[in-house]
Amino acid sequence: QVQIVESGGGLVQPGGSLRLSCVVSGSIPSIWAMEWYRLAPGKQRELVARITRGGTTNYADSVKGRFTISSISSDSAKNTVDLQMNSLKAEDTAVYYCNTNPPRGPWGQGTQVTVSS
């Protein structure tokens, strides 16, 4: 059973930084990427960043130049990917989730990021 756990969220002032971590436990064969999403109140879930096994990255236009997704780190028991978020804005406030592509298990609980002064 694949389990996804996100962490690292919190309350930060505009212009601040946070680093989110995602640990995907369990066997995840044949995935080609890991992705970070976010869900803000009243909005649809948005793909924020993606990194493929080969290291290719993609970002939503709204976060380009501010967010950086790390390489996928893998061992026999888990796969990890981080999201470094700099120059945070109020509109970055959301619950952040990660998942594999294609999905191999249920969504995790997410981690809340609140950007407010």
Image (spheres, rainbow, N blue to C red):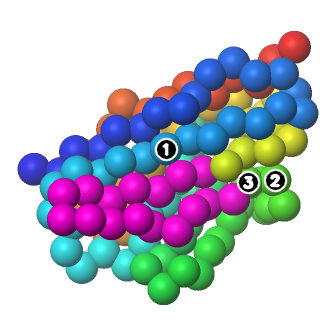
Locate residue 67: give its quadrant.
bottom right
Q: Is residue 27 left or right of residue 31?
A: left
Locate residue 33: give its quadrant.
bottom left
Return the residue found at the far left: 1
Question: Please, what secondary structure does the residue beneath circle 3 have?
Answer: strand
Q: Residues within 10 Å of mark 2 (few under 14, many from 20)?
A: some
Q: Earlier in the sequence, mark 1 or mark 3?
A: 1
Asked if the magenta segment contains residue 75, the reply would be: yes
Disc 2 designates what residue?
66
* Distance between mark 3 and mark 2 Cα atoms: 4 Å
Cβ atoms under marks 3 and 2 closer than 8 Å: yes
* Distance between mark 1 and mark 3 Cα atoms: 13 Å
Disc 3 designates what residue?
67
Residue type of the residue flagged with mark 2 = Arg
At 72% from the left and 45% from the top, the residue drawn is: 85
Return the residue found at the far bottom: 54
Residue 112 x, y percent position in the rendering: 55, 26
Asked if the magenta segment contains residue 117, the reply would be: no
Q: Residues within 10 Å of mark 1 (few under 14, many from 20)?
A: many
Q: Earlier in the sequence, mark 1 or mark 2?
A: 1
Disc 1 designates what residue?
21
At 69% from the left and 59% from the top, the residue drawn is: 68
Frontmost residue, 30 versus 44: 30
Question: Please, what secondary structure does the residue beneath circle 1 have?
Answer: strand
Residue type of the residue flagged with mark 1 = Ser
Tell me if residue 41 can be seen. Answer: no
- Which range of residues does the magenta coloring cover? 68-83
Residue 102 x, y percent position in the rendering: 32, 69
Question: Please, what secondary structure does the residue beneath circle 2 have?
Answer: loop
At 58% from the left and 81% from the top, the residue drawn is: 56
Residue type of the residue flagged with mark 3 = Phe
